[in-house]
Amino acid sequence: MTITLVAVAAAIINVKAETHTVHFFNNCNFGTPYLRNETGDVLSTGQDYTINGPLVGAIAYLQTGNCGDNGENCTLLQTTLLNGASVTDISLIPPHAFSVPTGFGYYNGCDDEGGDCTSPDDCDVQVSCQADNVDLAITFCD
């Protein structure tokens, strides 16, 4: 009986688990992709980043040598990956400014949903996703 209860409890915990991965494509041939959490800690400098739980208030940008620690002076991508309520947008709100074409797309849920910022005049992008455990691909110079 105890073994059965432990197995049932483990199954329930696994069902409620949440995981998300952020993947980068840097097609610019220069710069370093940065992913930072809401407190400014660097989570990735181009390698895949996987979190077991929600990723709330993260920012990403391509460090070209002109970006501040929070992506100032560069194209900024903001994301929250949260089961049932993910949202990602691209911002040029000052102090951020267009630096490189930047795009994103969800995968493993909400496939084919995403957005692109290809010029300073074409960056009004915000896309939500209600899927659980959705992942995000970010592309620079797409």
Image (cartoon, rainbow, N blue to C red):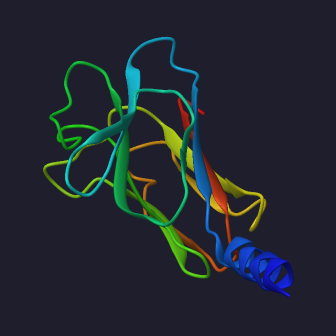
Residue 85 sits above or below residue 134 on the image: below
Give the tally of numbered discs.
0
Residue in the picture at 13% in, 49% down: 95
Residue visible at 70% across and 63% down in the picture: 113
**Vertical order, 85 against 93 (above or below):** below
Measured along the vertical axis of the image, is residue 45 above or below residue 123? above
Would residue 46 appear left or right of 58 to someone viewing this image? right
Which residue is at the front of the view, 2 or 99? 2
Question: Which residue is located at x 22 percent, y 58 percent?
Answer: 93
Tell which residue pokes out farthest to the front in this image: 1
Residue depicted at x 48% and y 27%: 46
Seen in the picture, residue 43 relative to 54 is either above or below; the reply is: above
> Where residue 132 appears, x then y in whole percent?
68, 74
**Location of the N terminus (image quadrant):** bottom right
Give left or right: position of 137 versus 102. right
Q: Position of residue 110 (x, y in %)?
A: 74, 68
Quadrant of the rendered image containing residue 94: bottom left
Answer left or right for 74 relative to 100: left
Where is residue 9 drawn, in percent x and y? Answer: 72, 81
In the image: residue 90, left or right of residue 47 = left
Q: Quadrant of the C terminus?
A: top right
Residue 99 on image: x %, y %: 33, 33
Q: Hey, which quadrant is residue 24 in on the image?
A: top right
